[in-house]
Image (cartoon, helix red, strand yellow):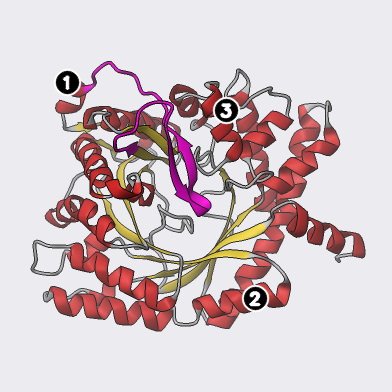
Amino acid sequence: MLNQKDILSTIEMIDQQHLDIRTITMGISLLSCCDPDPKRACEKIYEKITRYAEKLVKTGEDIEREFGIPIVNKRISVTPMALVAGASETEDYVPFALALDRAAHTCGVNFIGGYSALVQKGMTNADEKLIRSIPEALARTELVCSSINVGSTKAGINMDAVALMGRIIKDTAKATEAQDGLGCAKLVVFCNAVEDNPFMAGAFHGVGEAEKVINVGVSGPGVVHHALQAVKGQPFDVVAETVKKTAFRVTRMGQLVAQEASRRLDTPFGIVDLSLAPTPAIGDSVARILEEMGLETCGTHGTTAALALLNDAVKKGGVMASSSVGGLSGAFIPVSEDEGMIAAARQGTLCLDKLEAMTCVCSVGLDMIAVPGDTPAETISAIIADEAAIGMVNCKTTAVRLLPAPGKKVGDTIEMGGLLGSAPVMPVHPESSADFIARGGRIPAPMHSLKN
């Protein structure tokens, strides 16, 4: 039973500690929209999305107003588009992205995810067509997000897809050069992608999901940071317990919103994703949580251990608060979206290699990192391969969202605004990985993938 103290504490978390519902995401299956005629398929896609998600934004706004809980984003995720477009007799998949964008604008959502392909073991003709269309698709749309899964613990790593994605990321940066390569902020490369992730740019509606579903993403770095200020100097057992209790309270709020949205939209409730997703706002930073544990600057020795504790405690607290915790759930470390990470990167304490080490113990991976515009495609592919290897061997989701900034060099800054923030351009190793990437083929799955 909630008492007055609990209620006042929650109000304080919302008013002063940046607690919010980061997103209500409606997942929609588009498998019924497959059609040999691409024009007809696009019409079906637009019609189905706008019919199912017609009241999504209004419902989110109503809940926000009635409960006094900020809901920052309302989003849609759809079936990986390569699976839908593959039924159509066409070489040009950009119209499918345009249909998604038009539907998203009609529904009034912030983003729509699912311009995606799953190629961890190999690429179909449809997968390759979609991947090669990404630069133009993201340049010609505003709200569409794209994701490609290039590896998994069960299948290994598709190095041909990894090599291709390095070139695609470079082409996407060039196609959106006037916006500092903004298209790359809407493109993520996964290993072990999950089917119920409500966060962009990686959200898609998996084939194992229902016809439609509501997934909610909650975020509360500021709340956790504030809670840790009360246990300064105390042992890590106390730190972990404090984070767990805080995560429990945050997840309960997410569960309430998710169930209410599910009821009002007559859509099954999927999961609550409790991910500490930061924003550029002061006081809403994962880096500052790690520094509150005793690190002078995020990125110094001890950072990986602190992040491991944080990620584990968040998951434990969330699981106790909801029987439907899913998605990614843990701690995100996107450089451009976290003011503490930005400060540490500018100082030089936080580098790409340290970020890679941190991805072994966080929720996702190398996220929203700006690199020089002249970074070779093979270097980007090699970074993807390294990150996919971490995910494959450790049976976890990892991802890469790199921003090769056209015309920018190390020390420059790119500005994207809003939740995407700004990013200092970080150095990459100058030595070539071209011969490594040129080998192609597939890195086999690890021995522990054989669990049947």
Q: What's the distance in space between the residues labelled 2 and 3, CA to CA? A: 37 Å
- Return the residue at label 2: 63
Disc on res. 223: none
Question: Where residue 12 appears, x then y in whole percent?
Answer: 81, 57
**Residue at the extreme right:** 4
Q: Residue at x 55, y 21 (%)?
A: 349
Apparent side of residue 265 relative to residue 190 in the rendered image (left or right) = right
Q: Are marks 1 and 3 in contact (CB under 8 Å)?
A: no
Q: Earlier in the sequence, mark 2 or mark 1?
A: 2
- Return the residue at label 3: 344
Question: Where residue 127 appears, x then y in whole percent?
Answer: 19, 54
Q: Residue at x 24, y 58 (%)?
A: 137
Apparent side of residue 220 relative to residue 436 in the rendered image (left or right) = right
| Closer mark to the observer between disc 1 and disc 3 | 3
Q: Is residue 394 positioned above or below 301 on the image?
A: below
Q: Is residue 247 positioned above or below 403 on the image?
A: below
Apparent side of residue 205 relative to residue 338 in the rendered image (left or right) = left
Depth check: 256 or 277 in front? 277
Q: Residue 205 colored magenta?
A: no
What is the secondary structure assignment of the residue under circle 1?
Answer: helix
What is the secondary structure assignment of the residue under circle 3?
Answer: helix
Question: Where residue 94 appears, x then y in whole percent?
Answer: 19, 63
- Return the residue at label 1: 435
For the N terminus, the quadrant is bottom right
Find the magenta span and give its range: 404-433
Q: Three-letter amino acid code at disc 3?
A: Ala
